[in-house]
Image (cartoon, rainbow, N blue to C red):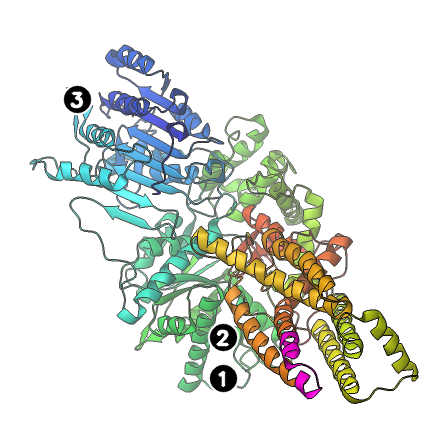
Amino acid sequence: MSSEIVEPWQVSAVLVGIEVYQDEGREDLPGAARDALRFAAWLRECQVPAENITLLLTCTPGSQEEAREQAAKLGLTIMDATFSDIRSAFLALEGTRSELLFTFWSGHGVMHPSKMKRYLFYGEATRGNALALTVDSLHALLRQWRYQSLKRQIFLVDSCGWFLRQRDGEPIDVPFNSDDVAQVPTDQFDLFASREGQASSHDPGAAIGEFTQKVVDSLSNSPVPFPPDLERLTKEVTEHFNARDDTHHQQTPVSIHNRASGGASREFTSGLFERGQDLASAPDHLKTALGELHEESRKHIDRFLLSRAGIATREGPKAINVRYSTLTAAPGVPPGSSYDMVRRFYDTVPHGRLAITGGPGSGKTVLAIRLVSELLTQRRADQPVPVLLTLVNWRRPSDRLKPDGSQTYEDSLREHFENWLVDQLLRQELCASRDAARLLVSGRWVLPILDGLDEAHALQTTNSAPHESPEGSGAAPLRQLLTAVSRYQFQGVPSPVVVIARSTLNDELMTGLSSACVVEMQRLSVSEIKTSLLSTVPEYASDGLWAAVREDLAREEGSVAARRLDTPWKLTLAVRAITVAKAISPTQLVEPGSTRHDGILHERLLAAFVPAACADTVVEKPRWSDAGKVTGWLSLLACYLDGHQSEDLALSRLWLIAGARPVRVVQTILHVTVVGFFGFACILAALGGAGNASVAYDHLIDVITGSTHLSGDTSRRFWAASAFATATVAAAAITGWMRRTWTPAVSRRTRNLRMRVKGPSRKARLMRVCSGIEIGSAIGLAFGTAFFLLFGWAWGLAMACTVGIPLGYGLEAKVGLDRTLSGNFAPAYYWVWEGIALGAGTITGAAVFWLIGSSPWAGAGFGAAVGYFGAFAIGLIAWLRYVIAMSLMRLRGQLPWKIAAFLDWAHRVGVLRIHGVAWQFRHTELQHWLSSQPAKSPPPPRIRGQRRRRLPAPE
């Protein structure tokens, strides 16, 4: 946690002390309220304003008056420690200016023995209605965008960690409702009074919590109160309990630090356990690469999660515990499990080879993301690093690879699959070098989580020629992919791999991946639908508008709503359409009708998804609220994807939407105009010398009309300048008209273009200053040289400054010139080539000028300027094409000017997801629906050599 000093007015606190419980079998806890008051007193001594402290107490009858008096002395008022008041206290933190939050909780707690979740009971908890809050759900709430100012959060929990007994019944997790699950980087530190299976020592007679007393003492002795030294706090508290000579009551405080920087690493510490081995442990030559892969994979998963994902797409208050059943029997593998138990289930799968199937929107990808997240969190040093990859970018092997069933053929497929894995690790910047990626793949230190096998199936059905059989060499990319994955082994033992596909591929999966355990996502039960609606729609339980839905769901299996909301995706659509977009009423969910009626209703729900996204509150600007325009823009993007062999929205390729020919025509004209002007200046300078444009122009007219004839050095200079001008204009026309642009490998998506440089802010500022100087000097030098050749030194210098300085600052600091269109500016890449071109131009210019009878020194300067600007301009081609296309589409109303910002907005509201350097539609069904909407202009033509591909129609 950062050591930057926090002022007392920037500190907030929620203090809970529950002494009385409604459950007769749960003993009262005298002293919990005093512990909270003791912590409040420390905060007030540290000058924290009273209005920043919320005190929630449920006192025993004999201590109520004393608690009120103590609170009044501190300038505080007491609220009841009930679910509703505790919920209100945390929700009231929305929009706070505080940077540091203390959450103190003293009361009864319990640990779930299989889920390993810590529950904190509300005062209303009874044996038949054990209402509780999990610490995980509180973490998830306080990581949301609405609490973005609370970058540092400290949770101090003085409660027992007894394992839940079977006769007690499972606690009912009642999280705080919220309509926003987008997460922000937040430092969260937990210090629990005891580890799992232990009690928290408490003296009922003295009404003192030993843990709280030691925490307050340690904080009071800290030289700087905010933020506290957490390492020192943990050390002092754990040493105190370790030094106790108490064989009857062992208590081990435990701290967990979820750091926002470096991929949200987790660190478990306690006085009785040594610190675990670093996750990056591996052979010495792979230790660094494996550690980087672990952290980058974590960040990659975090990008998937950084958006409003609906009700059922991540761990947190709104996650649905979706169930799945096992289709293939194997020793030790359970017949099924659920979302929150996927990590334990995966441990039982032989060789770690798992196939997840299910219908559209059933939660397959969500389950895979949960699995990756938990595998990363709990990975041992001898385990591979899980990496989520999408098969939409899978490229089939060459047709020269004939399927003869031999081992050589299968080994070739495996090698092709391994090469593809290496390319994906590099493309998504999960590895720093190809050598490192290849070593990690060959050593099986990578656990591929392959999402979207349906895409390979679509390629099979689309690319098959009528006369070819399914087993033909050019018609079975799915079979080839499954064979390659099956052969993904290490020393003859199948290596771990997870594949995600639709249920329609079950037979092919079971045949192609005979060693994999296949599971199928289950439909949501009525109980799960009710639970989700209760937790996500505050008015569901009491509002009369939802009465018909409540009555219908009470019919259990005969429920109409249960049939229409039987997947997380359908449930998300319905909730957003009703509560956010107001597109339908709840009663329409239970209106009886045919299958056709269900389809029409589903179309209406799909149509409401984008308007609901526009109605969402998004913290970061810019925002888009015009649902009609946004739907049109997304429809155009969906049509573009439908006509190309890719599902990626990459900035470097979006210029094709404006039409390849118009963009290339405009760029060619611009290239020829600028370069032609420079070439014309060179010709005039060759005839009359630099700065004599008017005299040289008259001389040129005489030469053209034949009234003057050239000879000697003047003739050589004239024809050399003419040849140079012709060659450069031709090169400009070719580069402007060519189909592809010259850009380095894209290695990161564009997001926040001003933050393109890694490292400390001082280095970032230096790199940006150097980049601005490079841009300004290159453009200014080109225009300055042209005007010098025409009108002399004064004009040249003035034009160089007039053009170079504003453009150098504007294109770098304001526009964010990014010539790779990927966010990976990599200035050193361009500087190297510009330096090489400058040197080559210097040598060439000096030699040519000497041959035509001019000063070699002048030639060296002229060649240096041409080489420097030429190399700079070549790197600018892709960016210029992008700007032209965006300008054309902005004029036509097809797409917004800030297309990168728009795509990031669509990601934050849950329409798109991020995959490597590109964006993809999060829901295939939504993409198909958008592509079927009437477009404002015809879809762009396909690129030559690409085949049209359609995905399977949604079920």
Q: Position of residue 465 (x, y in %)?
A: 64, 79
Q: Tags 1 and 2 in contact by the CB under 8 Å rule?
A: yes
Query: Which quadrant holds residue 586?
Result: top right
Circle nearer the N terminus (1, 2) = 1
Q: How much space separates mark 3 and mark 2, taking CA atoms?
A: 69 Å
Q: Amino acid at mark 3?
A: Pro
Up-down: is 219 above or below 884? Answer: above
Q: For mark 1, what is the residue?
A: 403
Find residue 204 and name its label: 3
Local crowd at mark 2 within 10 Å, few (<14), some, or many (≥20)?
A: many
Can you say which quadrant of the picture contains the N terminus? top left
Marker disc for residue 479: 2
The CA span between labels 1 and 2 is: 10 Å
Q: Is residue 771 above or below residue 56?
A: below
Q: Which residues are magenta?
A: 849-863
Mark in the foreground, 3 or 2? 3
Q: Which quadrant, please, contains the C terminus?
A: bottom right
Measure the alpha-carbon separation of dots 3 and 1. 77 Å
For label 3, the SS is loop
Compare marks 3 and 2 and give the one earlier in the sequence. Answer: 3
Earlier-in-chain disc, 3 versus 1: 3
Q: Is 598 in front, or is 262? A: 262
Left or right of 929, for residue 436: left
The reply to whether discs 3 and 2 touch (Cβ–Cβ < 8 Å) is no
